[in-house]
Amino acid sequence: MAATIKQIGELAGVSSATVSLVLNKKKGVGPETRDRVFQAAESLGYRQRRQSGVGEARTVRFLRIAKHGHIINPSHRVFIADYLDGIEGEARRLGCAIEVATYEHFEPSAILEDLGRGGIEGAIVLGTELDEEDFLALRGSPLPLVFIDTFHRSFDFDFVDMDNYSSVFSVIEYLHGKGHRRIGLVKGSIETRNFAERERGFLEGLEHFGLPFDRRDLFAIDSTYEQGRLDMARQLQGLADPPGALFCVNDLVAYGCISALTEAGFGVPDDVSVVGFDDLPSNAFMNPPLTSIKVSKHRIGQCAMNLLALRLEDPGRPSEKTTVGGELVVRASVADRQGEENRA
């Protein structure tokens, strides 16, 4: 087994960070320490990874996998671009190059074969639409993988995801503070791990504030705008008294929901307040502008690239699972019901 950065550091009596600086020929380390690190590396048989050419950066790949396309689709290009922007910026800082590969279907054998062709040293995977069986299939990867936009405690991979639970809890806290006492949930008809975590945060938030939840106030619609609008319209048929507020598991779900509510004769926010998740740029131009949870996709991309760089230097390090918190961006889609008796 190849020597790791950690082992070199222990033998040389320095930190892993110092070893990395020395081996990557960075400034900030004295000559005696440099010599000690190089001697330790040589005695352990450490060989730095081959670069493709003199002065050329090591290359890592960003895998955009659309297993079914209900969530990873053209409408979500903005936040995927934010992930990639964060990855690329951190890669440049670390002296790495990024290439992008898109898979419109999940075929693990083809993905693993591509990863094993050479020329790249690791990959960051957009895992939004992947489930547990898919992660099992990717255990055979010949290269280190870091997953973003998903999170599974049971797998020994590095993950960086948004903190869905606490973000949605803050939505319930906000709606409760605005006087809403009957709050419904609009979830995705195709489940993802993130959607499931948002539903858990929603239900536990209601319980924390002593708010009841009627299963009739649960709606499941598609995550694409047009089909989501049709799904919501169908579920609103014959419903004369909807919840006074709705939390939607993402902004596109919220767009379809608002459109269906308007077509059914309900005003937003006068009759029904709506909150989304993702804070897409178009939220500010909705009618009304949409209140939503904003999570820094740029920061998630940065964290993922950092984790991958650490993994490349020290393959044996324990896996890390990181979450990035969100903030509520308040706009005009929520009515203030303080002092009123909300619909029960």
Image (cartoon, rainbow, N blue to C red):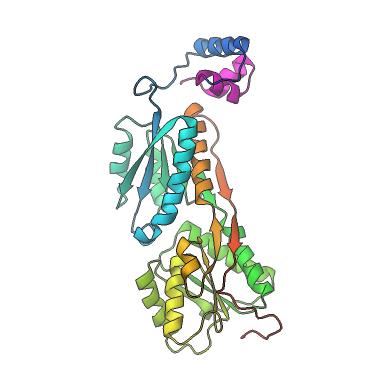
Which quadrant of the structure image shows residue 70?
bottom left
Q: Position of residue 160 (x, y in %)?
A: 52, 46
Residue sitting at 32 percent across and 33 percent down? Answer: 116
Residue sitting at 55 percent across and 79 percent down? Answer: 269
Q: Compared with residue 291, is residue 82 higher up or lower down, i.e. above or below?
A: above
Q: Compared with residue 39, is residue 66 higher up or lower down, i.e. above or below?
A: below
Q: Position of residue 37 (x, y in %)?
A: 57, 14
Residue 243 in the figure: left or right of residue 108: right
Residue sitting farthest toward the right: 339
Instruction: Note whether residue 154 is visible.
Output: no
Main SS, magenta region, reads: helix
* Closer to the camera in the image, 316 or 178: 178
Q: Position of residue 174 (x, y in %)?
A: 65, 69
| Magenta highlight on residue 9 | yes
Residue 211 in the figure: left or right of residue 142: right
Residue sitting at 60 percent across and 15 percent down? Answer: 11
| Magenta highlight on residue 79 | no
Residues rendered magenta in the picture: 1-25
Residue sitting farthest toward the front: 285
Which quadrant of the structure image shows residue 190?
bottom left
Instruction: Note whether residue 192 is visible.
Output: yes
Residue sitting at 53 percent across and 12 percent down? Answer: 38
Q: Position of residue 272 (x, y in %)?
A: 54, 80
